[in-house]
Amino acid sequence: MIKPAALKYLYSAGGVIYRKLGNQFDVALIATKKGTVWTLPKGIIDKDESPEMAAVREIQEETGLTGSIIDQLGQKSYWFYLKGENAKCKKTVTYFLLGYISGEPNNLSWEVDDAKWVPLEEALELLHYKSDKEILARAKEKLNRFG
């Protein structure tokens, strides 16, 4: 008899870190899966952290960039299966918009294959996941209001 899958719930935070060059916004993206999947930086919220703290930390770890939170961009949830644990997992990610303070896209976490600044319009095309594209579209709306 096959044991039914357990249910797990994970909570992550991350977001869109941006800089303005001239009249163009650049955003930082990371590549995973041997550089084939471009996505937004994010990671698990530790027990002693708020979602905001986790977003700042994860973005720094995965991109090498330090930023400060400007605004919230919302949440996205999705399900996946952890075969090794026979568990169905629901992950909820809280996203934030961060203004760039310092750093270069290097010194990356072991989980990341690459990180780079990408013009916002190009990033919308480059992102692999629909949910990331939706979050970046929200960031674009907010950035256009800021000018």
Image: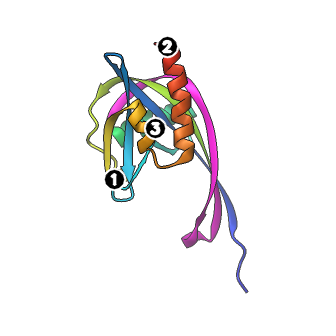
Where does label 2 land, which residue? 146
Describe the element under mark 1 as helix, strand or loop: loop
Q: Amino acid at mark 2?
A: Phe
Where does label 3 land, which residue? 124
Coloring applied to the structure = rainbow
Q: Is residue 93 left or right of residue 60?
A: right
Is 19 located above or below residue 125 in the figure?
A: above
Q: CA distance from mark 1 to mark 3?
A: 25 Å
Residue shown at the point (38%, 44%) measured from the top left: 30
Q: Amino acid at mark 1?
A: Trp
Q: Is residue 73 left or right of residue 101?
A: right
Which quadrant of the rendered structure holds the N terminus? bottom right
Tell me residue 73's x, y (percent).
58, 30
Can you see residue 45? no
Residue shown at the point (31%, 39%) measured from the top left: 116
Give, as a single range, the part of the protein colored magenta: 64-90
Q: CA distance from mark 2 to mark 1?
A: 34 Å
Describe the element under mark 3 as helix, strand or loop: helix
Q: Is residue 109 left or right of residue 7?
A: left
Give whichever of discs 3 and 2 has the lower sequence position: 3
Describe the element under mark 2 as helix, strand or loop: helix
Name the image quarter holding residue 40: top left
Where does label 1 land, which residue? 110
Tell me residue 72's x, y (percent).
58, 26
Residue shown at the point (26%, 33%) measured from the top left: 104
